Image: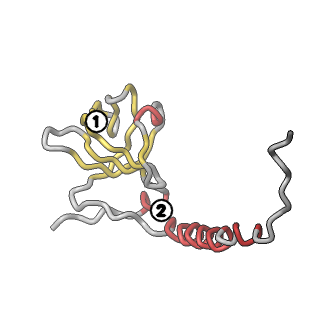
Amino acid sequence: MNRCTPQAPRANFPHRFGFAAPLALAMCAFSLSAWGQDAATRPFPPQAERGVIQVTQPPDLLLNGKPDRLSPGARIFGANNMLVLSGQLIGQKAVVNFVREPNGQLHQVWVLTEAEAALKLPTSP
C-alpha cells in the first residue's frame, strides 16, 4: 500500500515565485544607492578633536604618542562607519577624530578615510 502517490507538477509553479524578481530588483537598487555614500564625509560633532591612535592593550592606547584610555562605553567607528572592536586595531596606527567624556577618557572615535583626514577640522566659535 503506497500512501504517497506522486503528484503532477502544478501549473502555477512559476507564479509562486513571482515575488522574487521585484525583490531582487529592489535589493539591487538599494545596494547601488549605497555606492554614492562613500564620497561624502561623515558629520562629526563640533567638539571633535583629531589625533593618531595606536591601541596597545584595550582599553589602553597611545594618542599622539602619549598614553590614554578608552571609556567603558567607548564606540569606535571604522572608515566604513561601522563599529570596530578595539582589539581589531591592536598595533595599528590610525588617524582619527575623537570626543572625550567628562572624565577625560575617549568616548567616541572615528577612524578617518584618506579624504576625511585631508580635510581640516572646523574650529568651534
Q: Residue at x 37, y 49 (%)?
A: 96
**Residue 37 appears left or right of 44:** right
Lower sequence index among marks 2 and 1:
1
Which one is in front in this view, the residue at disc 2 or the one at disc 1?
A: 1
| Quadrant the C terminus occupies | bottom left
Q: Quadrant of residue 68?
A: top left
Task: Name the spot of residue 53 as percent of width and height, x first.
Answer: 38, 40
Image marks 2 and 1: residues in contact by CB distance under 8 Å: no
Quadrant in the picture for residue 106: top left
Q: Secondary structure at mark 1?
A: strand
Mark 2–mark 1 distance (CA, rounded to whole Å):
25 Å
Q: Quadrant of the N terminus?
A: top right
Q: Is residue 24 above or below residue 68?
A: below
* Nearer to us in this view, 94 or 58: 58
Residue 44 relative to residue 25: left or right: left
Q: What residue is shown with label 2?
A: 115
Residue 103 spot, x, y in % from top left: 14, 38
Q: How is the image coloured?
A: secondary structure
Q: Which residue is mark 1?
A: 70
Give amino acid for label 1.
Leu
Q: Is residue 91 above or below residue 9?
A: above
* Apparent side of residue 25 relative to residue 122 in the rendered image (left or right): right
**Mark 2 closeness class: few <14, some 14–19, many ≥20 residues within 10 Å:** few
In the shown orientation, is residue 67 left or right of residue 55? left
